[in-house]
């Protein structure tokens, strides 16, 4: 909306203002001009906007009285136009402008302005522009989008997907209408009422048959009810119907007026509070998760969270509280979750604790090697940047449990040895497929691209990663405290995956 408003409210009045300085204007009383054009090219001195090989037709009528009355009809059917990151091929999406206004004493009053983008997007504007000093005020703006998918692709996805790659994973289908009253862009202020009907697809989330009525008050006082209604939500393997979020708009605020219970096919979500601040944007809320079940071919899990408080800005997400995931007969707890830089190289920070994890179930779906028993531990100070670990403190140790055998295979022993010292253990005698272990205890640290690994068991100056049972093999850390570059450690992981 800002881009199209910019043309009607700033660029065209500026061109007219330059025309007023010419000698021709001083002798002008009336002008009627109809002209077809083709091959017109112009770029601003800074190269930020301009057009190339433009073709179309314009009709211009000027009447000079106490003010200058202006009527303009402009259609562009060919050529290309660039405004900052927004690119338009007018042959594919022809555009039409209509404008009626008056110009007097460096003030342009737009009585009516209309833009039609290929019949799928229409914009009506009524307002006023001061040319010196520049200011722009809209008495009325009406944006009617009949094809949200095409508008989203042209104005958001194509120009911004390199900055925000997640945009490529978002699809919007339906229609949208937006009305703004007494609205300014600089400084930002005014009232907006928007409506949307259609489907929205986000990563791992689909909102079907969605109806939105959303009032917003930017830097002006007001209060009005709104709502978000969704007929069906598909989230991973979960499905829920008839979700209704009652909203209240106030000055720079959007508030959930009452708690919402969302009953999924497998579990429940309770939204206790939701509050969105604008200028600057800050979304804060609290929710609980109860028994959310996710199942695939590898494992099944249940997720719980009791009043998880969260805050979201354009670049940062933070959660206070615990997320408990019940998986592999044990529990994984995530604390201090933070996500930064959604646009280019996302950074994830968290502390993870796990207990009573069944190794047999874990190893069944991994290539590391078969093991059985129960383990506990943590991954503290975890930092992942663009999917790559940057820092962590990892500890994992076995826990003796009744009726749980502690067994390990030679494959798993060798893979642990490769991680610790870069090579498998040399075995010169026969061993059964599985043999018992007494204890597993490993501590790893990654910081500043330096990786270290230690065993938790120490006897007679020897550090053990795996201590054997009645028979079997010990895994000894032959270089305690040795620092390995993380890229070399990744090569060790690759060596394991190739075995």
Image (cartoon, rainbow, N blue to C red):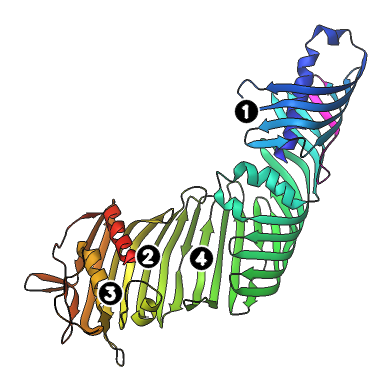
Closer to the eye: label 1 or 2? 1
Q: What element carries label 4?
A: strand
Image quadrant occupied by the C terminus: bottom left
Closer to the eye: label 4 or 3? 3
Badge 1: few (under 14), some or many (20 or more) residues near its Cα, within 10 Å?
A: few
Q: Is residue 84 left or right of residue 298?
A: right
* Location of residue 467 in the rendering, given as x and y in whole percent from the top left corner: 18, 78
Q: Name the residue under label 1.
A: 48
Badge 2: few (under 14), some or many (20 or more) residues near its Cα, within 10 Å?
A: some
Q: What element carries label 3?
A: helix
Identity of the residue drawn at 51% across and 50% down: 315
The reply to whether the C-beta atoms of the residues labelled 1 and 3 are less than 8 Å apart is no
Residue 263 falls inside the magenta stretch: no
Closer to the eye: label 1 or 3? 3
Give the quarter of the image for residue 65: top right
* Location of residue 496 in the rendering, given as x and y in whole percent from the top left corner: 30, 65
Q: In this view, does 425 lie to the left or right of 402?
A: left
Q: In this view, does 460 lie above or below 102?
A: below
Label whose residue precedes the other's in the sequence (2 or 3): 2
The reply to whether the C-beta atoms of the residues labelled 4 and 1 are less than 8 Å apart is no
Q: Residue 412 carries which label?
A: 3
Q: Name the residue under label 2.
A: 351
């Amino acid at each position: 909306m800002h881009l199209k408003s910019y043309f009607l409210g700033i660029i065209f009045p500026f061109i007219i203002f330059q025309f007023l300085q010419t000698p021709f204007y001083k002798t002008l009383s009336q002008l009627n001009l109809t002209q077809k054009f083709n091959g017109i090219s112009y770029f601003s001195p800074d190269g930020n906007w301009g057009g190339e090989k433009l073709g179309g037709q314009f009709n211009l009528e000027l009447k000079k009285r106490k003010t200058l009355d202006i009527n303009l009809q402009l259609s562009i059917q060919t050529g290309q136009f660039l405004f900052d990151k927004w690119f338009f091929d007018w042959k594919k999406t022809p555009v039409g402008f209509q404008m009626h206004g008056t110009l007097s004493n460096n003030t342009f009053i737009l009585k009516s302005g209309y833009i039609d983008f290929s019949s799928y997007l229409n914009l009506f504007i009524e307002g006023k522009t001061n040319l010196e000093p520049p200011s722009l005020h809209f008495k009325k703006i009406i944006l009617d989008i009949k094809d949200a998918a095409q508008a989203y692709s042209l104005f958001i996805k194509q120009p911004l997907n390199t900055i925000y790659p997640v945009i490529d994973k978002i699809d919007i289908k339906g229609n949208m209408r937006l009305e703004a009253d007494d609205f300014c862009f600089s400084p930002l202020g005014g009232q907006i009422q928007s409506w949307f009907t259609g489907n929205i697809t986000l990563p791992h989330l689909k909102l079907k048959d969605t109806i939105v009525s959303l009032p917003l008050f930017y830097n002006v006082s007001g209060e009005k009810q709104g709502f978000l209604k969704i007929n069906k939500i598909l989230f991973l393997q979960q499905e829920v119907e008839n979700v209704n979020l009652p909203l209240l708009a106030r000055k720079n605020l959007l508030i959930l007026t009452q708690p919402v219970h969302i009953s999924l096919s497998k579990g429940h979500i309770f939204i206790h509070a939701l509050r969105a601040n604008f200028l600057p944007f800050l979304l804060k809320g609290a929710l609980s998760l109860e028994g959310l079940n996710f199942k695939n071919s590898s494992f099944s899990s249940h997720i719980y969270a009791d009043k998880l408080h969260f805050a979201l800005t354009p670049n940062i997400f933070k959660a206070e509280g615990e997320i408990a995931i019940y998986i592999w007969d044990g529990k994984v707890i995530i604390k201090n979750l933070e996500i930064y830089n959604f646009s280019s190289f996302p950074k994830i920070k968290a502390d993870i604790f796990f207990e009573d994890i069944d190794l047999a179930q874990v190893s069944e779906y991994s290539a590391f090697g078969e093991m059985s028993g129960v383990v506990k531990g943590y991954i503290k100070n975890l930092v992942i940047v663009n999917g790559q670990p940057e820092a962590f403190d990892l500890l994992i140790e076995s826990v003796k449990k009744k009726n749980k055998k502690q067994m390990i295979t030679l494959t798993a022993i060798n893979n642990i040895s490769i991680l610790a010292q870069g090579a498998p253990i040399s075995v010169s005698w026969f061993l059964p497929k599985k043999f018992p272990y007494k204890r597993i205890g490993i501590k790893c640290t990654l910081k500043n691209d330096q990786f270290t690994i230690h065993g938790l068991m120490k006897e007679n100056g020897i550090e053990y990663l795996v201590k054997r049972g009645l028979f079997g093999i010990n895994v000894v850390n032959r270089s305690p405290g040795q620092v390995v570059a993380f890229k070399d450690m990744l090569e060790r992981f690759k060596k394991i995956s190739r075995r």
